[in-house]
Amino acid sequence: MINSFRFLAILTFVILHAVPGHGQQLIPQPSELAYAEGRFTITPETVIVPHESDDLAGYLNDHIERVCGFRLRTVPHTPETNYISLRRGGHLGNEAYTLSIEPEHIIIRGGDRGGVFYGLQTLFQLMPPEVYGQSVASAPQPLTLDAVSVKDGPRYAYRGAMLDVSRTFFDKQAVMQYLDWMSRHKLNKFHWHLTDDNGWRIEIKKYPELTAKGAWRGPGEVLPPSYGSGQRRYGGYYSQDDIREIVRYAAFRNIEVIPEINLPGHALALTASYPETFCRTTDDPDPNGNGVTGNVLCAAREENFEMIRDIIHEVAELFPSHYLHLGSDEVSTRYWKKCPHCQALMKKQGMKSPQEIFSYFVLRLEKIAHEEGKRCMFWDEASATNGLSAGTVISGWHDLKACTETVDRGLPVIVMPASYCYIDMKQNAFDRGHTWAWLVDTRRVYALDPASVTASAEKSKLVRGVEGALWAELLDHPDRIAEYQAYPRLCALAEVGWSRPEVRDWNDFYVRLTGTHLARLDAMGIGFHLFAPEIKYDHGVISAASLPHATIRYTADDTDPTAGSPRYTAPIRDTLPERYRFRAFYGNAHSPVVPPAATFDTVACQQPAYADLPAESLYRPKRHLVPDRYARRPGNRHQPARCNGTGHHVCHHP
């Protein structure tokens, strides 16, 4: 292995001398890209020919104005030269596009509106990072772009990101911002986890108590304080008008919003608001795997299914998506086992175990959704249910084996195993986050190969795509931690879902990410996770190195460095290194805090030097370093926070 400081010097040279122009290091990597001679200059005389994409012409103009300080005229007919054309068609597939920059013009052609939109995203990445800012250029200035030809399209139709708004509530503006960042990376499915034990976040007009009571937790509320909400009233919800606005905002950005109403378990917000929905006859409500009691609906109460029908009816009218996600994960059958009404149901239906009640409930949920013209999505616990419709999609969260079992049953799967795709996990030993799926850093996400689920060409058609999940137990603090957890891990996932395997390479991705894309993330205003600086202590000398353009700051009193701490400029001589803490800063972003003695087993600024190591060997859990309560096991996906984010466990590679 090469010396990491030497590698940083090489990496700095590569980044600073990589490709001429504003940003030809694209993420996700396109299928085909070729540079050509010449340049095209956007001037006030340039015009936009929108053809079928009038709405996107205004969107393009908003971005040009940020860089150039002027807007372009739109015209109905194509002139001979000096124009930007937005076209559809050309025998391209869904979301596919071509982008051609020549000295006379720029032409974007998409297979559909989504393809045109993604062609624009690639065009924006060829512009200076200011294109993502919020301010307009102070003075008019032309913009020159290198000639290039791009032919591109998605590997998978489903490229998703899930946001849990139950445990930590994010207001409307925060959700819309999250959607905008997704669209920049060609992510097209927003899985919106709207209900869970810790809060009901969607207005249902027929059942107002769901938000009057179920959206709030704290002293005197039906839901107790949890996940850092403290001894105060905490919560919130989205009105139906909010929902409609968010859905429109997403649709403009080629994002389908898939709502999740989690049933029949993880339903404490519902059962606490309407207690009659629970198996009230049980006298010993055992907790499920999450320390929560009373969170499963009674399966024998027919009124519950009428209530579910009413809820799904209102939800279906708000979301044009073909899919409704109806959860069905981590459902404790103990309540049904002790409920005489559920036992009577078992006898009537000829069931032999409470697990059959679960299948009964899942099939009834599916039937109700179908009656509303929707297809279902469920978590992978439901995949073993006999009789599921062939169009029902399974979210494979446990592991790759669960995804394989799903396609073996003939069901479509979204590949999102926790050990690759749960971006609430720690990114290294010093970060805040869960550890039950071990450390999930950017390189780990990038290592996911959805095709590994099956070797069968026929079954591979059932692999619909990928998704990154951001659960919100530990997103209550510090400020902007959701952004820190999501990026750049979602950048890696975007390339997993979009780019063909033959154009994907971790080392190349890392250079593109650190060379130009971090500057784009910063311009978007994202407080992303900056890779940790490399800190070494040797014979009384502490030395530090980080990415180009990052600033390292430090403290010598055991406190965490801030943006106002002393800047590291040269090696420090001291025989007490344990007092020091280091952190790198880059615009809105920062790295984790690192002591001089830290040895990382996940991505740091020198990570490409490790490319020859097998991916799995980097992330094999070390049982003696992981408390049992964090071990990955069914029923513990949403383990309540207990000491998470405070332990400094360090794992050394075998």
Image (cartoon, helix red, strand yellow):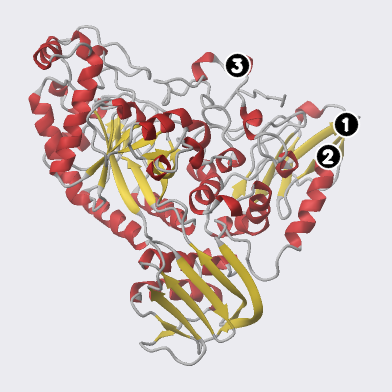
Residue at x 36%, y 67% (from the top left corner)? 113
**Residue placed most toward the observer, 92 or 270:** 92
636 relative position to 286: left or right: right
- Asked which secondary structure carries label 2, the reply is strand
215 relative position to 599: left or right: left
Residue at x 37%, y 36% (from the top left corner)? 395
Q: Give percent across and percent down for residue 444.
A: 59, 38
Q: How far apart are marks 2 and 3 (CA)?
A: 32 Å
Query: Foreground mark, 3 or 1?
Result: 3
In what quadrant of the picture does the C terminus appear? top right
Query: Which disc number belongs to residue 538?
Result: 1
Locate residue 89: give its quadrant: bottom left
In what quadrant of the picture does the N terminus appear? top right
Query: Which disc number belongs to residue 294?
Result: none
Instruction: Tell me, yes or no, if residue 207 can be seen here.
Output: no
Task: Check the image and report above or below for 52 versus 208.
Answer: below
Residue at image mark 3: 623
Task: Check the image and report above or below for 91 versus 565.
Answer: below
Identify the mark nearer the N-term, 2 or 3.
2
Residue at x 53%, y 56% (from the top left corner)? 525
Q: Distance between the residues labelled 2 and 1?
A: 8 Å
10 relative position to 263: left or right: right
347 relative position to 623: left or right: left
Residue at image mark 2: 543
**Residue placed most toward the observer, 354 or 413:** 413
Locate residue 578: give its quadrant: top right
Identify the mark nearer the N-term, 3 or 1.
1
Q: Are marks 2 and 1 in contact (CB under 8 Å)?
A: yes
Residue at x 76%, y 47% (from the top left corner)? 567
- Asked which secondary structure carries label 3, the reply is helix
